[in-house]
Image (tube, helix red, strand yellow):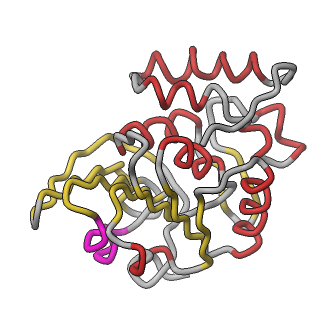
Amino acid sequence: MKIKTDENDEYRIPRERMVKTQLIPRGIRDKDVLKVMGRIPRHLFVDKDSRHEAYNDHPLPIGYNQTISQPYMVALMTQELELTGTEKTLEIGTGSGYQTAILAELSREVYTIERVVPLLEKAKSLLQSLGYENIFFKAFDGTLGWEEHAPFDAIIVTAGAPKIPQPLMDQLADGGRLVIPVGDRLTQELIRVTRQGDEFKRKNLGGCRFVDLIGVHGWKE
């Protein structure tokens, strides 16, 4: 899936600047991730009042106490999934739908879960209007995963958890990668888990700060 781009897009230069000044200097080297983030219109995924900030180096509020993540964090998490275009990917936390769009460009199928129904409906409407046909949506507790479509080759969690939800570990395919922020409600460490049979190898990718992952296996509301 490749989104159509408008050559006259007034945000093309800020988008290119984002890639050149925020992503590449910080070690984002996956050419597909860089290409996709240089093409997807991030400004469409934020409120009109925030569009002038869409390509700046920080998260932005999207309502309902949720945010669209800093571009670098989106790039880092996506790069760590090591997507090749063949994966069935699970996203926990649809939010604005921006990360979803990136996953849809780089995966075979994307299954995305959001607990805030108005956010899910808004993201679904936008993503479908942009022509994406490989995204499947569900309003649900993301900490439980999406068991009927498991196993998943890649899982990304865009909210901070007190621990890695066991259902997500169980739904990860052999050889699959899971990227999730884990810690307390103020700060987390970004963790990548790689499944090798019944073993789960962890790698700490550094500090981060996300909104709370609410659910049975996350924080209580």
- Quadrant containing the N terminus is top right
Is 164 covered by the magenta stretch? yes
Which residues, given as a range, are shown in magenta? 162-172
The residue depicted at 77 percent of the width and 33 percent of the height is: 53
Residue 168, above or below 17: below
- On the image, the x and y values in percent for residue 64 come to 73, 67
Where is residue 152 drawn, in percent x and y?
35, 63
> How many numbered markers are drawn?
0
Above or below 207: residue 188: below
Q: Residue 176, position in %: x, y?
A: 27, 55
Residue 29 image-quadrant placement: top left
Residue occupying the point 65% across, 47% down: 98
- Which is nearer the eye, 42 or 148? 148
Q: Can you tell which quarter of the image residue 167 is in?
A: bottom left
In this rendering, would 220 be left or right of 114? Answer: left
Q: Nearer the viewer, residue 139 or 181?
A: 139
Query: How far from the left and from the top, in percent, is residue 41?
Result: 74, 35
Q: Which residue is pictured at 73% across the width and 66% down the height? A: 119
Q: Residue furthest bottom?
A: 216
Q: Is residue 179 magenta?
A: no
Q: Compare residues 93 and 154 and report the one nearer the observer.
A: 154
What residue is rendered at 41% in x and 80% in y?
148
Residue 31 horizontal side relative to residue 153, left or right: right
On screen, residue 173 above or below 73: below
Which image quarter holds the C terminus? bottom right
In the rendered view, does 154 fall on the left or right side of 21? left
